[in-house]
Image (spheres, helix red, strand yellow):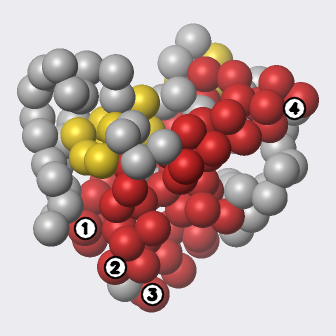
Amino acid sequence: MVRVGDADNDLTSGSIRIRAHHLLCIQGFQGLGYSKEFTKNMAQIKDELLNNPSSFIRLVIGVDSICECCPHNSKGICSKGHTSENKMRVMDSLILRNLGIEAGSVISSKYIPSLTRNLSRETVFRAINGGNHSLFLW
Ligand code: SF4
């Protein structure tokens, strides 16, 4: 069962903010990205989350630790296209709804692979087609 918390405590206070649709991007990341800084940050986050079983993520709707180094992040808003932030938020909400997890929940990163496996094919299809990301495969 996925461990879910909604408040900071000693265990989860160092959690990494991850916007929900980035669960797919983390899994699909292949070392490419929007800039050198973005790619380096993404690689570090992926390594931490998938190889450190004691790390935690806070699932959010909105910009996250991956967006922090993205050239499209304009003062906390995804500005890849003029409607991108809205589209990204719709994708985040869709993923959370499909998983039955509330925004702001904290979970162990070791559940990331099983969470994405549990997403319905329809949800993944809608998420891919609802945003501007290139199939989450960078
Ligand atoms: S394109 Fe937008 S959602 Fe994706 S990483 Fe950049 S700022 Fe974040």
CB contact under 8 Å: marks 1 and 2:
yes
Q: Residue at x 48, y 30 (%)?
A: 64
Q: Which residue is mark 1?
A: 99
Nearest the camera: 89 or 112? 112
Q: Earlier in the sequence, mark 3 or mark 4?
A: 4
Give the spatial CA distance, label 1 vs label 3.
12 Å
Q: Earlier in the sequence, mark 1 or mark 3?
A: 1
Q: Residue at x 80, y 37 (%)?
A: 39
Q: Which residue is mark 3?
A: 121
Q: Earlier in the sequence, mark 1 or mark 2?
A: 1
Question: Amino acid under label 3?
Answer: Arg
> Which mark, by number, is residue 35?
4
CB contact under 8 Å: marks 4 and 1:
no
CB contact under 8 Å: marks 2 and 4:
no
Q: Which residue is mark 2?
A: 118
Q: Quadrant for residue 17, please give it.
A: top left
The quarter in which the C terminus is drawn is bottom right
Question: Amino acid under label 1?
Answer: Leu
Instruction: Tell me if 62 is positioned left or right of 83 in this view.
Output: left
- Looking at the picture, how far across and down is residue 88, in whole percent? 50, 47
Give the spatial CA distance, label 3 vs label 4.
30 Å
Residue farthest to the bottom, as pictured: 121
